[in-house]
Structures are given as C-alpha cells and as structure tokens.
C-alpha cells in the first residue's frame, strides 16, 4: 500500500465514521427536520467555500447549463433526503432508520436496467431479496406486538430517504462533472436553498428556542458532519477504486448501529442483528467484482 493510497483510505474511513455518528447528534438537536437539513446544507457549503479560499482556490465552477441544473436538482434531492432521514430518527431507533436508509443500493440495482442499461444478474437479484428480508427482520416483523405506529412511520421516512438518495446516486452518475468540490458546494447550497420555501410555509421560525449546547451541536453537524465529512469523502476518491469506496461506505451503518446501542442503549434482538448483517452483507456482496 503506497502512502497516497493509505492516506486516501484513512480519509474515507474517517468520513464514514463522521457520517455514522450523525444520528446521535440529531437526537439532541431540538430543530425540525427541515430546519436542520437546511442549516446543514448552508453551513456545509459555506465551510467548503472557506476551505477553497484558504487553499487559494477561487470558486470558479465550470459546467454546462444542463449540468448545473442537474446539480441543483440533485442538491434538492439531497436536502429532502436529509429531512426524511432526520424525521425517521424522531420516530424509530437509529439502527432501524439507518438500515432502512441503506436499502438504497438495492433500489439502485433494481433501477439500473432502466437508467444505465445494466443487466440484472442472478447475484444482484439475490442480494436485493436478502436486503428486503433483512429489513423485515430489523423491523420487528417476527414480533408483531412490538411494532408500533411510530416505528412504521420511522421506517417509511427512512425508506423515503433511501429513495431520494437513490435519485442522487443516479443523477450524479449520469451528470459527468469532474470538479468534485465545486460539484459538492453547488449541491449543498442547493439543498439549503430548496428547503427555504418549505420552512417558511410550514414552520414558525420565531417559535424555535436554542440553548448554547444545541447551537454547538448544530455547528458541529454543519461543519464536521457535512463540510469536513464531504471534503474527506470526495478527497479520498482520486487514489481509490470505486469498488473500494462502495464497500468501505458500509462502515457508516455499522458504526451508527454500534453507537446507537452504546450511547442510546437501543435494544437489538437476535433477529435485528441477523437482519443488519443481511442488509449490509448483501450490499457489500453486490459491489464485489462490479468493476
């Protein structure tokens, strides 16, 4: 392993650990999901602009009009994706929310013949089936009495977030923009801007009161979980294979589940653990030998 490869791998792992801890922070921030998602995008985009300025790089993003519009649409999908995921955390456990969210690879696999003209292999279909079965186990379907309306709403919000993130993945794959940092800045700021009208129409801004701890947590989420996290994530890609990036990305849900159990004392049954292994394992297997 050369020095650049090792550094890139460390950056990728760092970004996954950062992303995996976001659910814990969300639990202690008394903002609505829409407001938090909007703030996250705004702070993250401003942070990356500041990083570019410190490095002496002026922000001169070059793309065609069509590419720019697509990036803005992708940014909107990212904003809605965050909002739905944050809302999912409000109704069910972080473990269940995270695993519903990580149904995204299965969704992309099923949509790949339509958008990328890729053939659905037996291996991919088996992986999708195992993922769905795994989510069923995580949901608590083996113990119907333990499933409440709140958990069902949380799962639906998590799956909704997965649908939005699938759209982000598909749009990004079809929108060939080489400037990853510029691309990310446009998407993050677009995520915030698109959520402004929703917030003003549906929420009472003056009704939100925050203490010093909440403000600090919001700033951390905007800078660390968004600006730093995305900077590390995209900065790691030049020296790593896409398959490596895809597989290592599953550090995120594993770490999220471990944190939820350790910090929030969320209970994981034997079936939940089995379901988690099935979802993450199927996603990893589906990525192997795809290049």
Image: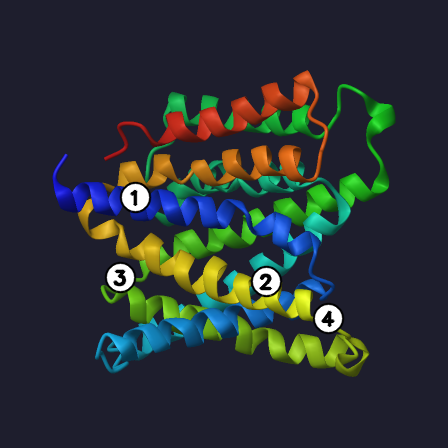
Q: Earlier in the sequence, mark 1 or mark 2?
A: 1
Asked if disc 3 and disc 1 are in contact, CB closer than 8 Å, the reply is no
Q: Earlier in the sequence, mark 4 or mark 1?
A: 1
Disc assigned to residue 208:
none
Asked if disc 4 and disc 3 are in contact, CB closer than 8 Å, the reply is no
The CA distance from mark 3 to mark 2 is 22 Å
Badge 3 element: loop
- Relative vertical location of residue 160 with respect to residue 132 in this rendering, above or below: below
- Relative vertical location of residue 63 with respect to residue 177 in this rendering, above or below: below
Task: Tell me if I can see residue 181 in this picture.
Answer: yes
> Looking at this rendering, what residue extends furthest in the right direction?
145
Q: Which residue was labeled with disc 2?
A: 80
Q: Which residue was labeled with disc 1?
A: 10
Badge 4 element: loop
Asked if disc 3 and disc 2 are in contact, CB closer than 8 Å, the reply is no
Number of other residues with Cα within 10 Å of mark 4, as a class: few under 14, some 14 to 19, many 20 or more: few
Q: Earlier in the sequence, mark 4 or mark 3?
A: 3
The CA distance from mark 1 to mark 2 is 29 Å
The CA distance from mark 4 to mark 3 is 43 Å
The residue mark sitting in front, 1 or 2, is 1
Q: Which residue was labeled with disc 4?
A: 211
């Amino acid at each position: 392993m050369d020095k650049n490869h090792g550094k890139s791998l460390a950056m990728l792992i760092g970004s996954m650990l950062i992303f995996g801890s976001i659910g814990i922070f969300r639990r202690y921030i008394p903002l609505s999901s829409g407001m938090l998602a909007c703030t996250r995008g705004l702070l993250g985009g401003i942070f990356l602009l500041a990083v570019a300025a410190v490095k002496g790089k002026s922000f001169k993003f070059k793309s065609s009009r069509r590419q720019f519009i697509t990036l803005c649409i992708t940014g909107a999908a990212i904003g809605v994706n965050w909002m739905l995921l944050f809302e999912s955390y409000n109704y069910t456990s972080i473990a269940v929310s995270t695993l519903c969210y990580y149904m995204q690879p299965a969704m992309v696999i099923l949509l790949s013949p339509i958008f990328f003209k890729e053939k659905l292999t037996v291996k991919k279909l088996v992986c999708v089936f195992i993922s769905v079965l795994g989510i069923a186990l995580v949901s608590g379907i083996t113990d119907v009495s333990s499933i409440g309306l709140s958990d069902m709403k949380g799962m639906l919000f998590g799956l909704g977030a997965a649908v939005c993130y699938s759209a982000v993945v598909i749009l990004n794959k079809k929108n060939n923009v080489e400037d990853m940092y510029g691309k990310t800045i446009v998407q993050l700021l677009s995520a915030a801007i698109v959520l402004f009208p929703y917030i003003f129409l549906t929420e009472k801004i003056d009704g939100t009161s925050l203490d010093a701890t909440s403000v600090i947590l919001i700033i951390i989420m905007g800078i660390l979980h968004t600006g730093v996290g995305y900077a590390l994530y995209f900065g790691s890609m030049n020296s790593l294979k896409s398959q490596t990036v895809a597989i290592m990305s599953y550090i995120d849900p594993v770490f999220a589940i471990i944190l939820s159990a350790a910090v929030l004392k969320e209970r994981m049954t034997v079936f939940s653990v089995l379901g988690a292994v099935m979802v993450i394992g199927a996603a990893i297997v589906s990525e192997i030998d795809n290049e």
